[in-house]
Image (cartoon, rainbow, N blue to C red):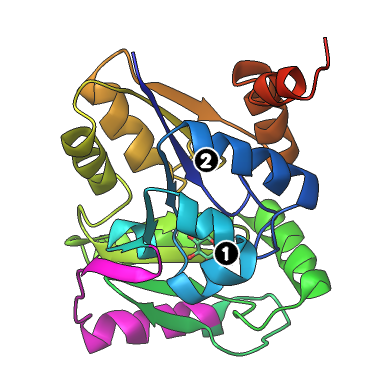
Amino acid sequence: MQHVLVFDVDGTLTASRRPMDGAFAAFFRQLVERYPIYLVTGSDWGKLCEQVPGDIREGVRGVFCCSGNELWHKGVALFSMSHSFPDDLSALALELVNQSRFPLRTGRHVEPRTGSLNVSVVGRNAGLAERRSYVRHDARHHEREAMIAAIEERFPDYEAHRGGEISIDISPRGWNKGRVAKELVSRHPDAQIDFFGDRISDRGNDAPLAQALREMGSHHHVQEVREPAETFAILRSRYPVNVGIQQQAGVA
Ligand code: M1P
């Protein structure tokens, strides 16, 4: 059975908002030549380009951005599903940001994206140290969980998920990564889809895609990882792509 490999980006292929590791990228290039591969990120295309090398972006079959609300192929947007969010939803998001007892604000707290709103108390301009500090705060106070509950209670037609480390993604109910499953299955009806994500448990934004694939058939495989190094290790053991290269080079 053909395998189609599908990857979340932040936390799965790269550290949050960081470029892909060089050794991992070298291995991944070989994988791209052998398997149909898709990337599925909550981020937009611009941020994805800062993280994933150009030849990998060109080589994959598709990149779903903004939680599946955009599909890109070779640098061209094939579809884009926008939504106009109610002003009072954006106002509530800002109110929750302002109510937080976390002391730092770096700016860009409510970022509109195609079909989703990204909300972050520390702000999208946070550097690494500010990010780490917010991650500790959130782990201690479960702040994002409380924000998600407040948003979904007041706006039941919308859903919210923890984004990566410091934010939540809000979208109209059903406009989540789960919709990607249908598109993948219609493109590869007889394949086994192997999905790797770091935010599958606890209402993470990879959960809807994991759930949709599980519902579509037990032959699909969902793998939760803790970090890119774990993804790399699993891929190396499951898809030993450099065997052919070693053989070509005369290595026994
Ligand atoms: O792709 C995963 C997430 O990456 C970022 O998360 P954070 O800044 O919270 O670590 C955001 O772009 C988020 O929207 C996205 O889902």
The residue at 76%/77% (across/down) is: 127
The residue indicated by pointer 1 is 54
Outermost residue, top side: 252
Q: Residue 139: tell me if it is visible.
A: yes
Q: Residue at x 71, y 67 (%)?
A: 134
195 or 215: which is nearer to us? 195
The Cα–Cα distance between marks 2 and 1, rounded to whole angstroms, is 13 Å
Q: How crowded is mark 1: few (under 14 residues within 10 Å), some or many (20 or more)?
A: few
* Above or below 199: residue 56: below
Relative side of 149 to 229, left or right: left
Amino acid on which disc 1 is placed: Gly
Look at mark 2 in the image and give the residue it sits on.
Answer: 32
> Residue at 19% across / 27% down in the picture?
189
User: In this rendering, is residue 232 above or below 100?
Assistant: above
Left or right: residue 155 versus residue 128 is left
> Please, what is the three-letter code of the amino acid marked with disc 2?
Val
Total numbered circles = 2
Indicate if the residue with disc 1 has its beta carbon within 8 Å of ligand 1.
no
Q: Which of marks 2 and 1 is nearer the N terminus?
A: 2
Mark 2 vs ligand 1: CB under 8 Å? no
- Viewer-proximal residue among 89 and 212: 212
Secondary structure of the residue carrying tag 2 is: helix
Indicate the position of residue 120 as horizontal and vertical percent values: 54, 74
Q: Is residue 78 magenta?
A: yes
Residue 149 visible in the snapshot? no
Q: Which range of residues does the magenta coloring cover?
A: 74-97
Residue 236 or 67: which is nearer the viewer? 236
Residue 192 is inside the magenta segment? no
The part of the image, by quadrant, that contains residue 84 is bottom left
Label 2 Cα neighbours within 10 Å, binned few <14 / some 14-19 / many ≥20:
many
Residue 208: which quarter of the image? Answer: top left
